[in-house]
Amino acid sequence: MIEGATGPWEAVIGLEVHAQVVSKAKLFSGAATDFGAEPNSQVSLVDAAFPGMLPVINRFCVELAVKTGLGLEAEIRLESVFDRKNYFYPDLPPGYQISQYQQPVVGRGKLTLDMSDGTVREIGITRVHLEQDAGKSLHDQHPSLSYVDLNRAGIALMEIVSEPDLRSAEEAGLYLRKLRSILRYLGTCDGNMEEGSLRCDCNVSMRRPGEPYGTRCEIKNLNSVRYVMQAIEYEGRRQIEILEKGGAIEQQTRLFDVARGITRSMRSKEEAHDYRYFPDPDLLPLVLDPGWVARLRAELPELPDAKKARFVSQYGLSPDDAGVLVAEKETALFFERVATGRDPKAAAHWIMGDLFGALNRFGIGIEASPVSAEQLGALIDLIADGTLSSRLAKDVFAEMVATRAHPASIVEAKGLRQVTDQGEIAAAIDAVLAANSDKFAEYRAGRDKLYGFFVGQIMRATAGKANPALVNRLLKEKLAQ
Ligand code: ADP
Ligand code: MG
């Protein structure tokens, strides 16, 4: 809810996400799809719309769209149709995009958001359809000419449309992150927003709580979660300002100006395209074998929600920790390798604390971690068997990150084994108390605060290697004498 000058407003948001299908070939041609290739080096005669060329559907792309639908618990439509969406633009040689319109391959589904207060919210998925990407106009290559790169032309996209169920920028951010996570688990889209594999159009309207939906504006082509959230925040405030002055929202397509953090009008409803959709006569309706769909369903991997629930019940993690660990498939895998046969909470603690800290510093993902799951497990074992205190383990971990060495060899090489010999610790305690007899007397006279001072001195005397629990126990015994 957003507080305006005249009372509260509620945002109503629906997202249209374009997700590039992970396929080496395009949706209707065999041309390659590698990112960053030389312009126009991955263009077949079909993509360039030479006369007489015919599209041939890529079965693998259909398979991934169906998997995506299954992952969103959606209806798989056994018969779907490809239409021509007609418009004229230099980066679209045929003058139309092949896209599913009234008969998409995937119908209604859903996705759950894990809210920050611990509750879950279900967001409706309206549909998922397959369509071709367009090419790209390059305006920065020549002072007076625009160039066209058709490498993207014909690449398979899944358009994933949500119901207008989102109510804030935060929810839109959660939705996008969750969707990206599911797509990556399924292996149907790499979710790489910097490379344009996942792009988002945001539909935003404002209403008084409980009132019917208002007129929406659509903000086109946002390529980061942060921009999506910023654009929604800005657009919401812009609409509230108009509405509070008694004005009406004009249905528009808007662009987000990244540099200025504002949205501006691109075209109004009157200027909207008339796409004159009709079924592409070069393509038969797409008919799926129910047995094939059933097989794909049976082969689905464990998805983030199910994995999170399992991490809570099997490993006793808090829902928050489990949520963090399952967000990326690779992190979940790493966690399970470390946790198996060990204290799962210790595994979660090390991964989310020291390991994430190190990965953030290097700006790398867990798949490139300098510390392997096996090595982190070995470090936790050294704590469990008393070789290392958790304090020493932190030093060993830092050394593991720096040198990629195994914890056991670091402990040996640096002589970091913790001191658990009671006689040795008792001797250190005696020495510290003898050397600080004045403070010892003050403590006896009631200055309890000095306890921490003694612990510090004893740790120092043992070069930080004394087992802290033993130090505490033996020191307390000594002081109580
Ligand atoms: P179009 O075909 O013009 O893109 P749709 O009805 O398919 O229109 O809706 C596109 C997106 O807009 C969907 O994600 C939907 O949830 C969202 N949407 C529809 N009505 C509203 C509204 N009043 N406010 C915000 N979003 C809306
Ligand atoms: Mg739209």
Image (cartoon, grey):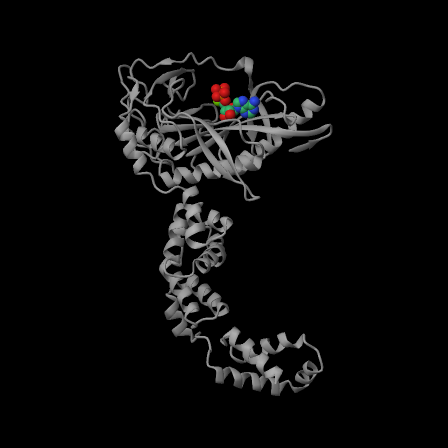
Can residue 394 be seen here? The reply is yes
Could you say where residue 332 lies in the image, as x and y percent from the top left? 40, 49
For the residue pair 213 and 431, the one nearer the viewer reads as 213
Can residue 218 be seen here? The reply is no
- The quarter in which the C terminus is drawn is bottom right
For the residue pair 448 and 406, the one nearer the viewer reads as 448
- The correct choice, above or below, for 371 with respect to 241 in the image is below
Could you say where residue 163 lies in the image, as x and y percent from the top left? 50, 26
Name the residue: 43% across, 42% down.
305
Q: Quadrant of residue 219?
A: top right
| Number of numbered labels in the structure image | 0
Could you say where residue 10 lies in the image, as x and y percent from the top left? 63, 29
Residue extending furthest toward the front? 313
- The correct choice, above or below, for 242 with respect to 222 in the image is above
Name the residue: 61% across, 18% down.
250
Name the residue: 48% across, 14% down.
273
Name the residue: 43% across, 72% down.
386
Could you say where residue 154 lies in the image, as x and y percent from the top left? 35, 25
In the image: residue 409, left or right of residue 51: right
Q: Quadrant of residue 436?
A: bottom right
- The quarter in which the N terminus is drawn is top right
